[in-house]
Amino acid sequence: MKTHEVVIEPGRSEKNYWRDLWKNRELLYILSMRDISVRYKQTILGTSWSLIRPLITMMIMFFVFSKVAKLKGDPGIPYPLMILAGLTIWTFFSNSFTQISTSITANSNLVTKVYFPRLIMPLSSSVVSFIDFLVALGLFVVLTIWYQFWPDWHILFLPFFILLALLASFAFGLIFAVLNVKFRDIGQLIPFIVQIGFYACPIAYSSRLVEENAGEWWHPIYYMNPMVGIIDGFKWSLLGEKAFFNPTSVINSVVIITIFLFISIYFFRKRENSFVDDI
Amino acid sequence: MAVITAEDISKRYIIDHKRGKGSTSIKDALGDQIRKIFNGKKSPHEETEHIEHEDFWALKDVNFSVEQGDRIGIVGHNGAGKSTLLKVLSKITEPTTGRIHIRGRIASLLEVGTGFHPELTGRENIFLNGAILGMTREEIRKQFDAIVDFGGIEKFLDTPVKRYSSGMYVRLGFAIAAHLDPEILIIDEVLAVGDAEFQKKSLGKMRDVSASGRTILFVSHNMTAVQALCNRTLYFERGQLIEQGETNQVVASYLSKISKTKLIREWNTPEEAPGNDLVRIKKIEILPEYVDNQIFIDVRTPFRVRFEYWNFMDKANLNLSLHMNSMTGECIFNVGTQSQPYAKGLIAGECLVPGHFLNDGTYNVSMMIVKDTVTPLYNMEEGLIFDVADYRDGVAWYGKWPGYVRPQLKFHTEMMEENILND
């Protein structure tokens, strides 16, 4: 029989951490299933909530930004489609980010009683957000059929932008997840960040409007937001050449996300063994 | 072969007096940093800040090793470090210093039903909890029927566990844990839950597990269970491992340490003795008649209760009345001496309480001196407090033995007619 040896020492990260993580993939699956099946228990509309929410948000935004504020969209693209595309990827990012940030504290009953690689918890929260995202993407497909708007070869880039959004949610979420264990202020801060992000990102409007103000002082600041490149790229993949997309903004996103991802994984791994003492 | 070797394990917690337990707020943390930058290190504020942080060693320099197939009991007061040790061994928290080497797959059961989700059904929770405890879906599927059967929840398999009674919840949780198949099993006081019937079942299961040669670490306050299940025992006090060795010996020294037992109280002069102008108590004493090398009273031990008191009256008809009370205040029995005339002086009396009579528990003796069989002269309440420890032989049940007394009465059974059911 193969013997399983473990050495416990202060500051010693598990040598086989990543292998351990892989071995626990069933736990990841089951925790994700738990969150999904628990979600709409005791609701009448059940899973249709994940369709109703983006649909109604889209309709309100269309009314406010296009009809009332009369913002110009990208020429040749129906405004509701542009909004829904931006909204879909933004909601994915913001849900995943929020869920990751609170994943450790939400599972405190597990943290204090059993060991498993703690990275399982943020991973399972992002799985749930990803399922929601797929549903919302389905809604988008239905709407493109309605508008008879067919995607072209750009759609091949879609997985890249989805992956980038996912990595972004980890890059920022993991840091907050660790901080949230000790400082519950984070729980208050996150909805606020998400709300600001909603306006700072090209969801209800097109980055074309920002580009028209290229000389303004805030123009470079706008592009420092890594989500701008991801959202524009996502819209560009789905809606084609007519959607505004500045490719350099994506380079920006990749660099920022990579740096933050390394920092936050390092930070998470360093702190995860003492979560139980702080929670 | 040693499966667990622990060397110099210590675990420190920093107790933060200013903020108390719970989460720190970012403002405080930031504030401290900013203050440091602006005030430099020698600010008066800094001095007081330091006093507010206090080190607490939940474990201090703990060394032990566990052999393959050992059943280790871990005993000690609340807060002695037992649970911290289990948490360190289960990798839930890391030690501040020291090193532990573990050989074998380890499973720890620090509570029953870890991670149960109230909205999910019993069936779903079996898979959830099993996965959390480290079982694969394949293993759970294989054991599924056995788990359901052991927990006795067939009828409620598809009911959300939030509708379960607390008993059902615990049974399901233990049933899953009982079907884990680790090489090393760590258990924290799970027997404190559930009804007597279920405790019996759980302990039986644990005995099976240990009989199959696996290693068990078992924290409990139930000394009877520890004695029945464990071959070696570790005794912790204030974070330190103060004794380890053969279970009976370690449990005995633990019991004698925690015992509130005071077997003698004596006053040398009438001036300081309790009583009044008529009578004063000189001495009250319990004299156990130990067999073997016993060092404390258990349910088998006969003992004598001895009194000495001064009588200051010239001539009086006196009798003594002894009350044996439980700690909850009920009188277990009351015996009295014959009333007889005494002159002024020191009077002694002795009463023999047989073995196999009192149940295990804590008792107090009170003593009353009565004149002419009707007038109480002095009543000494809680004269002595002592413990009677449990002892069982050939009984596989370790729950609290019911009853105030535990006499061994003649009980006769016989077979009346054979084979009448096998027609």
Image (cartoon, coloured by chain):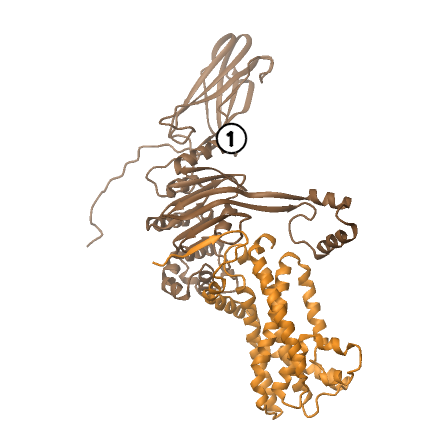
Q: Is residue B5 above or below residue B242?
A: below
Q: Could you tell me if residue B319 is visible in this image?
A: yes
Quarter placement of the C terminus of chain B: bottom left
Q: Is residue A140 above or below residue B204?
A: below
Residue reaching furthest to the right: A216
Q: Is A136 left or right of B120, judged from the image as shown?
A: right
Nearer to me, B5 or B121: B5
Q: Which residue is mark 1?
A: B260
Q: Could you tell me if residue A106 is visible in this image?
A: no
Image quadrant assignment for residue A244: bottom right
Which chain letter goes with mark 1?
B
* Residue displayed at 56% across by 8% down: B313
Residue A129 location, x and y as percent? 58, 73
Q: Which chain is orange?
A: A
Image quadrant assignment for residue B49: top right
Find numbered disc 1 in the image and state the secondary structure of the residue it sits on: loop
Image quadrant assignment for residue A217: bottom right
Residue A95 location, x and y as percent? 62, 71
Residue A130 location, x and y as percent? 56, 74
Q: Which chain is brown?
A: B
